Amino acid sequence: MAYQTVARLEELPEGRGHAARVGEVDVALFRVGEAVYAMEDRCPHQGAPLAGGTLEGCVVECPLHGWDFDVRTGFKPDDADGFPIPCYAVRIEAGVVLVDVEDEINRPRRGRSAGRGRSTRRGRSTGRGR
Ligand code: FES
């Protein structure tokens, strides 16, 4: 699909999100200073649109039950592990914001195969000796 135009930079308010649709994907855009971050506009808890949440710094709080997510990574701020909300590549060209929903810039880290399973387990087997 490549990059698609989603908004003009001046349309994105600070302190809250902006909803856009790219192909079949609902995207929440967040402006933090001159940077813009894009993530799937669907909370993993019960599906609320995160674009309607409150943004403090780089953390958005879901409007429904208050779960929070770092818009730069898609992870919970205090748990940079597990399965993040998909975040997408963003470009800004001449004040126009473009998103590529096929370029997912984060990946789940917990339980990945990629040959790392053994080293991960090694550090967790410390429960003996009680
Ligand atoms: S739907 Fe987002 S925290 Fe419940």
Image (cartoon, rainbow, N blue to C red):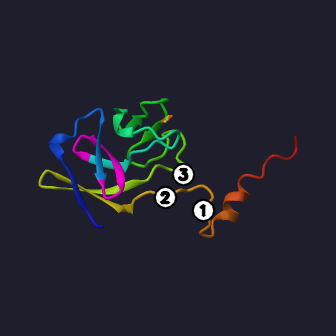
In the image, is 124 to the left or to the right of 80? Answer: right
Residue for badge 2: 107
**What residue is shown at x 54% (from left), y 51% (from top)?**
83
C-alpha distance separating marks 1 and 2: 9 Å
Dots 3, 1 in contact, CB < 8 A: no
Report the front residue among 44 and 61: 44
Q: Mark 1 or 2 closer to N-term?
A: 2
The answer to whether the residues at label 1 and label 2 have Cβ atoms under 8 Å apart is: yes
Give the residue displayed 43% in from the left and 34% down from the top: 62
- Sequence-wise, the earlier of marks 3 and 1 is 3
Q: Residue beneath label 1, please?
A: 112
The answer to whether 35 is drawn above or below residue 5 in the figure is above
Q: What amino acid is found at the position of numbered circle 1 in the picture?
A: Arg
Write down the residue under mark 3. Answer: 83
Report the side of 100 relative to 111 (left or right).
left
Q: Residue shown at 30%/51% (left/top)? A: 21
Instruction: Give percent across and percent down for residue 58.
Output: 36, 39
